[in-house]
Image (cartoon, rainbow, N blue to C red):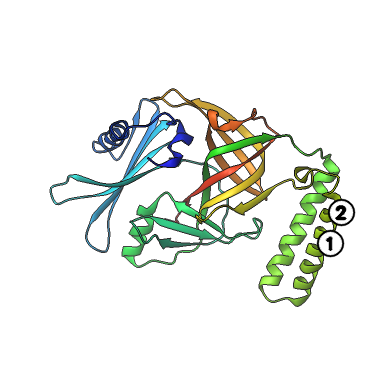
Amino acid sequence: MHRYLRAIGFSGLKKREELRALIDEVVKSNLTKSENQIGDYFSFRDVTVDDEDRAYAELFLDFVHGAGICIRGEFDTENRFLYEYYFPYLRASQVSSNEDVTVERHAEKESYAGVCDDIKVGVTMIFYLQNIIPYKRLQVMGRLPVHGTALVLSALSVDGTIMMPINKNESDKKRIKKASYERNQLIAQARMGDEDAIESLTLDDMDTYTMISRKIHKTDVFSLVDTYFMPYGVECDQYSILGEIAEFHTDKNRVSGEEVIFMTVECNELVLEVCINREDLFGEAAVGRRFKGVVWLQGFIEFPQ
């Protein structure tokens, strides 16, 4: 069983027969039309012929509004679908980054990882690519690498906590935003080899370290650290995040009836949509509060037409 199935409301899934039934539903709902509705739940199919002359496809079906299961495989010469593997997904709607993205294939199967180096995040983001068919289509056409893409990030979580926000007035918010903008400008200059910018960043980091070392003896770390985004564990697309909740809503899985919480989280100036099972979230979500948890990062690349 995929570990992150519980994030979209399948925490009680234990038997292979139950999983097989879900996979069959995804496949059957997509073999009649390329795009349709199962009630008011989204269903979508995308197919392309790859460079090995295979008709490769990915089939999407929502089990919660905005989240569901994707099946990938290929069609044989008799137009029968041959299942390869599945994964749970969350369909986000807000663009997270407009930086160029590098895509690399995983060694074990026909799946891909995306790499995005966005200055404002502070680390290189590696995510699981949701829509591989447009990429494979461009690959066959010889139009890679492609520039001018938009990246829509989403994340599934099976372990999260709601934390209270740090008390900030409007003056504090403006000061923090200005400092962040100036730091991003310095980072951009440092990447171009500006020695003065590199020195300024080094001195800023030393001042920050000294300040935190002095305050940490009397103050809780989460009162000093407002937000963070950092790699977690040995898998490159999993991250530990802390960010402010800008929006949230709840929904129910139409099969299991389990409650799922969707949150739009602002983390290191990055807008990220997160989905988590209510059973796995400690605390009550609310706008202005902070979400802290471990997430599996996914990305949908909006390739230019």
- Disc 2 crowd rating (10 Å Cα; few below 14, some 14-19, many 20+) is few
Q: For the view shown, which residue lies furthest in the left direction?
A: 78
Tell me the quadrant of the picture where the N terminus can be found.
Answer: top left
Q: Position of residue 40 (x, y in %)?
A: 40, 27
Q: Which residue is mark 1?
A: 207
Please tell me whether residue 202 is drawn above or below residue 302 in the rendered image. below
Amino acid type shown at disc 1? Asp
Q: Position of residue 119 (x, y in %)?
A: 65, 60
Whether residue 261 is visible, yes or no, is no
User: Which numbered circle lies on residue 214?
Assistant: 2
In the rendered image of this protein, does residue 190 appear above or below residue 218? below
Q: Which label's residue is closer to the chain start, 1 or 2?
A: 1
Residue 184, by quadrant, is bottom right
In this picture, residue 135 sits left or right of residue 76 = right
Query: Could you tell me which secondary element the residue under label 1 belongs to?
Result: helix
Q: Residues within 10 Å of mark 1 (few under 14, many from 20)?
A: few
Cα gap from disc 1 to disc 2, whole angstroms: 11 Å
The residue under the point 52% across, 44% down is 154
For residue 302, side relative to residue 282 (left or right): left
Give the residue at x 60% y 38%.
Answer: 264
At x 29%, y 40%, the residue is 34
Residue 54 percent across, percent down from the top left = 22, 57
